[in-house]
Image: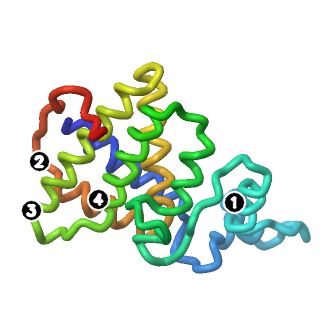
Amino acid sequence: MRLRHLVGAAMAAAALSACGGDDTNGTSQGNPSAGGNPPSGGGAQTQLSTADKIKALEQAGKLPTLDRSSDVKGPDLNANGIRDDIDVWIEKQGLGNAEKKAVQQLSRGLQVALLVDLTNPTAIRDAATANNLAVKCVITRSPDAGSGYRTVTDLEKITANTKSRVKAYLAYNATLDGTVSKSPEGDGCAE
């Protein structure tokens, strides 16, 4: 499972780079491919900011509409342990009941990982165990291992969709560096 931790950290790093630089308006100055202003001497082209491009893709249904609030937790109005925007994403996946429960289990586990007290080794270990079980459950209940892994990575990406969430996920994964875990017994599913 060490590979799993490395994959999670690599995905979080990729998501962080996708969040853009420190520029608060979502643009990267001087880099038109990143949605910023064209370099000096360029034409009078109007470039969309990264935020505007994302919004357009969301409105076209090509990207899920995600919460981008500054807090790590995000809204969970029904208090089911899953961010509301991720609840909507799960519903749109057209999953069967068993697979949907597996994805919800992983979503709860990833949310706990973002919010875990990094000074509490027991809480970190419990979060890691819960996530290992949930990953196995998703893969077990998916039509095939490939689609299961895609679901896991998609869920990681949409969970760590802002700079603060990516940083929290990276910090959590960093606490697992050097740890070893084995594949859970059974299918890993809570229900």
Distance from the alpha carbon under mark 3 to that under mark 2: 14 Å
- Looking at the rendered image, the disc whose residue lies closer to the viewer, 2 or 1, is 1
Q: Looking at the image, is mark 4 or mark 1 earlier in the sequence?
A: 1
Question: Could you tell me if the residues under marks 3 and 2 are in contact, i.e. CB atoms within 8 Å?
Answer: no
Crowding at dot 3, Cα within 10 Å, few <14 / some 14-19 / many 20+, comes out as: few
Residue under circle 1?
Answer: 54
Q: Nearer the viewer, residue 187 or 139?
A: 187
Residue 65 location, quadrant? bottom right
Q: Residue furthest top?
A: 144
Residue under circle 3?
Answer: 121
Question: Residue 29: x and y, percent?
Answer: 66, 73
Question: Residue 69: x and y, percent?
Answer: 53, 75
- Looking at the rendered image, the disc whose residue lies closer to the viewer, 2 or 4, is 4
Give amino acid for label 4: Ala
What residue is at 36 percent from the left and 54 percent from the top?
Answer: 108
Question: Residue 55: x and y, percent?
Answer: 73, 63
Q: Is residue 169 left or right of residue 50?
A: left
Q: Looking at the image, is mark 2 or mark 1 earlier in the sequence?
A: 1
What residue is at 91 percent from the left and 71 percent from the top?
Answer: 44
- Looking at the rendered image, the disc whose residue lies closer to the viewer, 3 or 2, is 3
Q: Is residue 24 left or right of residue 35?
A: left
Residue under circle 4?
Answer: 113
- Looking at the rendered image, the disc whose residue lies closer to the viewer, 4 or 1, is 4
